[in-house]
Image (tube, rainbow, N blue to C red):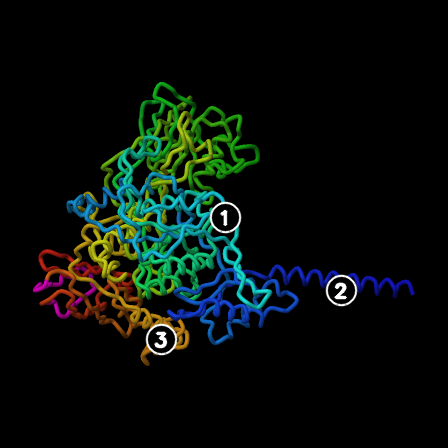
């Protein structure tokens, strides 16, 4: 009896354990999903939609878990859908509903983290002051980011007129953000959290209950404040970062209005929240949206599973230009993100300013390193100089100590010395290396790193300087040839007129696009290295130089910084041409872009190689030139629907997306994507049986009437490019003309070849670049 009773007891315990485990597994498998349901009718009843969405959830969620029948976010302005907590099985059941276009896990998106505008103006070769002053103040830029620090002088509204009457947005109050924090410059502010709009079924059968979560639009990271002021910050005289980069700080369109949408934190941004912010921004009445965030290039999603691509498509439908950063996963190819054709995708470049910190060796030799440091060291001092690998902690591989791994240095041997480390393992960031050296009581750190050297690192008050491999070899040679090597690292200095500039930033993500190579991405390049703009006052004492108050400005790098430059430039063009569509503004910025540096030579990468159009897009933006592009390529919503057909989406999905009865042509093929009326051209495959391809483009004359444009071609060796006709004559403004381009690769080398077609009437040069992959 006893064994039998024990067996039953054990069996009972096992069942209980199994049930608890299954319950735990079930709980763990519940996650946030986005349910996208296409375009929303202009006259749709959003409360009725929410009720229908809750009913859908009730049909797939078990009754004993009815607390999960709740909408985390509800999309009901430009497009339909919601986000909710679901199991994988429940998500699969919802995907079977006819009205559901796509359903996907709610992924976390990541942040892509004065002088720059002066540099862009100078590169254009056009006088700028009168043009900037004439800019209209009616353009509204929406910034989806980490919020805003409203007290910054960059958001001063002095001299600005009344808020445009079409503005429908709000200034959401929060725990530390009042309506009075908004003004005629910062005209709107919203915030979101993962529970920002939790809509649950009503208990009395009347209306759904909406619960707002605790929070505010105030920026606690600094990223959103920086991007907002870069796009449209007011002019601030005598701005600087603790004395560095001193001058007048201003945004790309100082007269434009700003509306901020806090959808992100330091840890990133929920895709569902970004979609909600885009939906709100469109309805509020913004003219363009700047988004300096995106997915990892390793985990890129299909266009209809990408929250930014979905929101941006509907923004274009409503006449709103969406500008996005291309990502910081460069310099490898196929790393660019936010690459949908209806998004203006931005790469990052340097400007003609650098921050240098001089290293003086004991033998008197001096080397210029890159750094932002506010150390108190001077030439009269000198400290022992040692290679990190020579002072490795016990049982630590020399390779780890050479890279300044955490815990790799012998603190007794490092204390009071200047350490030289290398960066052969990029998983250990510069900030970590600096903290390792600082924690070991070192007097300073010299980092040998060829790649990141072009992007200045802010080490605060800790002496730091970063040098190229050649200089690093010279320093190590000195250490090995001297009994008592010594050095000093001097505080950083600003170097203006730095050449060559611009240069494609090392980190800037490169094309071709991972989802399709038939659209050339990125589109354009803009300043994204060492950019000074407004920020939040630092609360970290290590970031503030001794004896200084926290700065109202910060110097940051990333395609995050390049993106609002283009948004600001777009707003500037929009202010001069309020009737222009998003694609016309994009075309103007692309076809007038600059492809030479301040030495008059072709633009290069940070390592000196000539940059390709997969590195820099059409080139560095020139906002002043974009005001008068001559011709523009207009890409319509209908064009984008054809793109979706060619990409492989079905009629039913495209009709839901567009809200129309659109039907795909019978010959839809990925090869036809290259025929999209885009301001650049990419042929994904050319060779084998098909050695020639012809594409068509249509241009619109936005210049003077009675003008004739003639085409000239510049192409890689062996690639034959013919344009027909070679001349386009226009008798009036807004007149359209179509031409064909034939690419012949019979004599071309394998791999990508690049070039451009330039249409000129003597006053305007309209450059459209191309990339052809010869197989």
Q: Quadrant of the C terminus?
A: bottom left
Q: Which element is circle 2 on?
A: helix
x and y, in percent, of residue 215 in the image: 50, 48
| Residue nearest the observer in this picture, 78 or 321 | 78
The disc placed on residue 487 is none
| Residue 382 makes an appearance in the image | yes
x and y, in percent, of residue 150 in the image: 39, 42
Q: Which residues are magenta?
A: 705-729
Residue at 45% over, 43% down: 220
Left or right: 59 with respect to 603? right
Q: Which element is circle 3 on?
A: loop
Q: Is residue 708 magenta?
A: yes
Kindly report the distance in space between the C-alpha atoms of the residues bearing marks 3 and 2.
Answer: 54 Å
The residue indicated by pointer 1 is 215
Rendering quarter of residue 286: bottom left
Camera-side mark, 1 or 2: 1
Q: Residues within 10 Å of mark 3 (few under 14, many from 20)?
A: few
x and y, in percent, of residue 475 in the image: 36, 30
| Residue nearest the observer in this picture, 117 or 644 | 117
Kindly report the distance in space between the C-alpha atoms of the residues bearing marks 1 and 2.
Answer: 44 Å
Going from the N terminus, do you reach mark 3 or mark 1 first? 1
The disc placed on residue 660 is 3
Q: Residues within 10 Å of mark 2 (few under 14, many from 20)?
A: few
Rendering quarter of residue 641: bottom left
The residue indicated by pointer 2 is 15
């Amino acid at each position: 009896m006893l064994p039998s009773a024990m067996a039953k007891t054990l069996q009972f315990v096992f069942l209980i354990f199994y049930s608890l485990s299954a319950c735990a597994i079930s709980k763990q498998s519940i996650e946030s999903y986005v349910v996208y349901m296409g375009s929303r009718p202009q006259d749709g009843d959003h409360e009725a939609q929410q009720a229908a969405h809750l009913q859908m959830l009730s049909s797939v969620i078990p009754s004993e878990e009815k607390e999960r029948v709740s909408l985390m976010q509800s999309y009901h302005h430009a497009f339909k859908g919601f986000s909710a907590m679901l199991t994988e099985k429940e998500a699969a059941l919802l995907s079977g509903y006819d009205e559901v276009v796509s359903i996907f896990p709610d992924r976390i998106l990541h942040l892509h983290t004065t002088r720059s505008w002066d540099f862009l103006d100078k590169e254009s070769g056009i006088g700028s002051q009168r043009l900037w002053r004439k800019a209209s103040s009616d353009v509204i830029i929406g910034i989806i980011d980490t919020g805003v620090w409203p007290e910054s002088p960059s958001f001063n509204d002095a001299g600005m007129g009344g808020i445009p009457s079409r503005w429908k947005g709000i200034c959401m109050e929060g725990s530390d953000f009042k309506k009075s924090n908004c003004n005629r410059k910062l005209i709107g502010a919203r915030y979101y959290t993962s529970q920002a709009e939790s809509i649950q079924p009503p208990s009395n059968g009347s209306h759904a209950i909406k619960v707002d979560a605790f929070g505010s639009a105030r920026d606690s990271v600094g990223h959103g404040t920086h991007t907002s002021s870069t796009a449209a910050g007011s002019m601030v005289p005598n701005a600087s970062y603790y004395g560095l980069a001193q001058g007048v700080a201003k945004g790309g369109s100082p007269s434009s209005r700003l509306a901020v949408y806090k959808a992100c934190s330091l840890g990133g941004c929920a895709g569902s929240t970004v979609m909600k912010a885009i939906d709100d921004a469109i309805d509020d009445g913004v003219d363009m949206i700047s988004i300096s965030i995106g997915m990892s290039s390793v985990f890129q999603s299909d266009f209809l599973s990408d929250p930014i691509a979905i929101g941006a498509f509907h923004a274009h439908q409503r006449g709103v230009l969406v500008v996005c950063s291309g990502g910081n996963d460069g310099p490898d190819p196929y790393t660019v993100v936010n690459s949908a054709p209806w998004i203006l995708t931005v790469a990052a470049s340097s400007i003609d300013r650098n921050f240098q910190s001089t290293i003086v060796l004991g033998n008197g030799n001096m080397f210029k390193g890159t750094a932002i440091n506010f150390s108190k060291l001077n030439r009269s001092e000198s400290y022992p100089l040692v290679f990190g690998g020579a002072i490795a902690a016990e049982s630590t591989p020399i390779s780890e100590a050479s890279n300044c791994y955490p815990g790799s240095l012998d603190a007794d041997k490092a204390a009071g010395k200047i350490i030289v480390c290398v960066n052969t393992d990029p998983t250990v960031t510069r900030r970590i290396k600096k903290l390792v050296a600082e924690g070991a009581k070192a007097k300073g750190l010299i980092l040998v790193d060829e790649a990141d050297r072009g992007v200045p690192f802010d080490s605060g008050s800790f002496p730091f300087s970063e040098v190229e491999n050649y200089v690093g070899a010279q320093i190590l040679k000195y250490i090995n040839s001297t009994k008592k090597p010594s050095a000093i690292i001097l505080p950083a200095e600003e170097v203006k007129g730095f050449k060559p500039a611009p240069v494609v930033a090392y980190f800037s993500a490169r094309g071709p696009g991972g989802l399709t190579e038939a659209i050339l991405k990125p589109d354009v390049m803009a300043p994204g290295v060492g950019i000074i703009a407004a920020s939040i006052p630092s609360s970290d004492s290590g970031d503030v130089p001794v004896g200084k108050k926290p700065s109202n400005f910060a110097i940051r790098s990333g395609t995050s910084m390049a993106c609002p430059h283009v948004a600001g430039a777009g707003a500037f063009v929009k202010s001069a041409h309020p009737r222009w569509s998003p694609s016309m503004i994009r075309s103007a910025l692309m076809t007038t872009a600059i492809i030479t540096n301040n030495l008059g030579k072709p633009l290069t990468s940070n390592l000196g190689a000539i940059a390709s159009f997969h590195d820099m897009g059409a080139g560095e933006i020139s906002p002043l030139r974009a005001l008068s592009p001559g011709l523009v390529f207009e890409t319509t919503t209908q064009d984008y629907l054809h793109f979706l057909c060619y990409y492989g989406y079905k009629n039913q999905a495209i009709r839901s997306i567009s809200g129309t009865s659109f039907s795909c042509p019978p010959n839809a093929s990925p090869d036809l994507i290259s025929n999209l009326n885009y301001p650049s051209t990419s042929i994904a495959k050319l060779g084998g049986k098909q050695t020639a391809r012809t594409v068509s483009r249509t241009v619109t004359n936005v210049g003077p009437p009675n003008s004739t444009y003639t085409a000239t071609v510049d192409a890689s060796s062996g690639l034959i490019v013919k344009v027909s006709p070679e001349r386009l004559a226009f008798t009036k403004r807004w007149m359209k003309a179509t031409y064909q381009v034939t690419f012949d690769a019979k004599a071309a080398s394998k791999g990508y070849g690049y070039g451009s077609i330039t249409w000129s009437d003597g006053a305007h040069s309209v450059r459209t670049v191309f990339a052809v992959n010869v197989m």
